[in-house]
């Protein structure tokens, strides 16, 4: 079995990315768009396009019932949710199943289990995967948080159990900071995810953020496609990712990969997924969370393995067994991705407006994933990421040199972007050494 027609329940560069693979394999596509996205490039790429609602995400890209209606009206076989939005919504995955539409992702049960960070921690611990020391149950209130924090020991990370993207997440150094941070973060998580449940984790000092890309089929087989280093972050949001990690030894890479497969098999996971870890200076690694979807940074894995992860997702969703074994996989060269945001590089505030010029660099070792074109309006309704630039080469040093040149030649006018910040990062000697921790931007980079 293979799909004839797919609805892409997303927007921007990831919608375009999914449509491109579908076109390559002669699969028809249906795009959905909000009123604000009516003239977006991805809308023109699809075979059919339908307005799903108003500008705001809850009126459009999160409108589950309307998306299912469009899917049924257009007779699609499957829905690809991309990343963000409904990609990790177990109710939507279930709704697809009830309407006999294949959800290109894991089961609703897996999404639900990994969607709660507290539940995910318990599951991983039971599966034998190392987890960060912290609370095993939800925090009841701020008084409970004070008691638990003293048991764990400061500094601690206050975290929301639901959602992601750094929302409801804050490092606190002492009890006074915890009292100030607790209510605000709990309320913020409730506003964004409908769930204000909080928990605590010990802060891993000088940590690197490293994740393992998985593929698992419906027949119990799973492989890992090595790792991505994601330590370059601002406000707990990634801005640069690379593969392989300059930190890991071969032994740590293998141990992390095997632990990730153990985790996937423990929850009977099927499709593409990512296990995120914090890695300390001694290469001890600790489970952070599982993303039950395609990641923004998946292109760097594609570049070093030669695989098309969207195609792999489609094959798994049709019930095909994996056609590649762990022994077949090897790391080929190096790749770095930077995220281009429509934002002020100093304040990180979004910079909406009309793009008057957009000219990404081009070349044999450059891959561009674009959400915009000349004349595109960047609105305040969505995530401000407008593009991704992926650069490849034989060695990390070669890739950094090519990336510096590519960023110098990247032209965007009409709005502010974070390109000056990215240039500062890649020129920094600490980054070039590969020893950048998650605190690197806030500690070292001034634009």
Image (cartoon, rainbow, N blue to C red):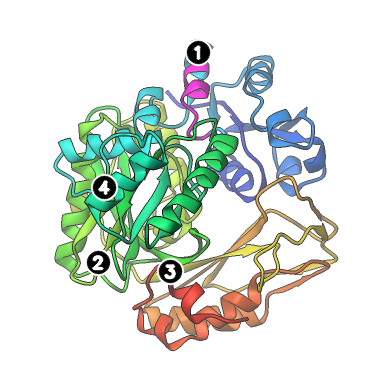
Q: Are marks 2 and 4 in contact (CB under 8 Å)?
A: no
Q: Determine which residue is flagged by label 1.
A: 100
**Location of residue 395 with respect to 386 vertically, above or below:** below
Q: Alpha-carbon distance for marks 1 and 3?
A: 39 Å
The numbered dot on residue 335 is 3
Q: Check the picture and name the quadrant holding the C terminus.
A: bottom right
Mark 2, residues whose alpha carbon is within 10 Å: few (<14), some, or many (≥20)? some
Q: Alpha-carbon distance for marks 1 and 2?
A: 45 Å
* Numbered disc 2: secondary structure: loop
Q: Position of residue 36 (x, y in %)?
A: 81, 41
Q: Position of residue 391 (x, y in %)?
A: 51, 71
Residue 273 in view (yes/no): no
Q: Alpha-carbon distance for marks 3 and 4?
A: 34 Å
Q: Determine which residue is flagged by label 2.
A: 280
Sequence-wise first label, 1 or 3: 1
Mark 1, residues whose alpha carbon is within 10 Å: few (<14), some, or many (≥20)? few
Res 30 quadrant in image: top right
């Amino acid at each position: 079995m293979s799909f004839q027609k797919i609805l892409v329940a997303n927007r921007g560069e990831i919608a375009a990315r999914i449509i491109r693979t579908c076109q390559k394999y002669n699969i028809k596509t249906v795009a959905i768009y909000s009123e604000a996205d009516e003239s977006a490039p991805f809308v023109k790429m699809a075979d059919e396009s339908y307005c799903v609602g108003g500008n705001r995400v809850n009126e459009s890209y999160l409108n589950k019932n309307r998306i299912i209606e469009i899917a049924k009206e257009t007779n699609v076989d499957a829905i690809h949710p991309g990343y963000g939005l409904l990609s990790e919504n177990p109710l939507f995955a279930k709704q697809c199943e009830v309407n006999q539409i294949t959800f290109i992702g894991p089961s609703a049960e897996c999404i639900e289990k990994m969607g709660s960070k507290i539940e995910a921690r318990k599951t991983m611990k039971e599966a034998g995967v190392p987890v960060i020391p912290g609370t095993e149950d939800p925090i009841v209130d701020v008084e409970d948080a004070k008691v638990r924090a003293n048991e764990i020991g400061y500094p601690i990370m206050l975290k929301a159990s639901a959602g992601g993207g750094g929302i409801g997440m804050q490092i606190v150094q002492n009890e006074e900071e915890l009292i100030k941070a607790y209510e605000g973060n709990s309320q913020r998580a409730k506003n964004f995810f409908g769930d204000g449940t909080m928990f605590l984790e010990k802060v891993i000092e000088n940590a690197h953020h490293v994740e393992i890309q998985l593929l698992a089929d419906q027949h119990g087989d799973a492989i890992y496609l090595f790792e991505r280093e994601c330590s370059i972050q601002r406000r707990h949001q990634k801005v640069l990712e690379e593969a392989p990690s300059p930190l890991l030894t071969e032994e740590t890479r293998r141990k992390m990969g095997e632990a990730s497969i153990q985790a996937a098999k423990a929850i009977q996971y099927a499709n593409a997924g990512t296990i995120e870890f914090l890695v300390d200076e001694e290469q001890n690694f600790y489970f952070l969370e599982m993303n039950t979807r395609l990641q923004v940074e998946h292109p760097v894995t594609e570049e070093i393995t030669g695989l098309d992860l969207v195609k792999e997702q489609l094959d798994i969703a049709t019930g095909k067994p994996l056609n590649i074994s762990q022994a077949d996989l090897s790391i080929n060269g190096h790749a770095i991705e930077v995220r281009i945001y429509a934002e002020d590089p100093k304040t990180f505030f979004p910079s909406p407006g009309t793009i008057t010029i957009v000219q990404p660099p081009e070349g044999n070792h450059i891959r561009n994933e674009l959400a915009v074109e000349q004349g595109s309006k960047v609105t305040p309704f969505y995530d401000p990421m407008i593009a991704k630039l992926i650069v490849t080469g034989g060695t990390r040093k070669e890739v950094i040199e090519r990336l510096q040149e590519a960023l110098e030649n990247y032209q965007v006018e009409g709005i502010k972007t974070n390109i000056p910040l990215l240039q500062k990062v890649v020129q920094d000697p600490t980054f070039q050494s590969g020893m950048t921790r998650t605190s690197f931007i806030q500690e070292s980079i001034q634009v």
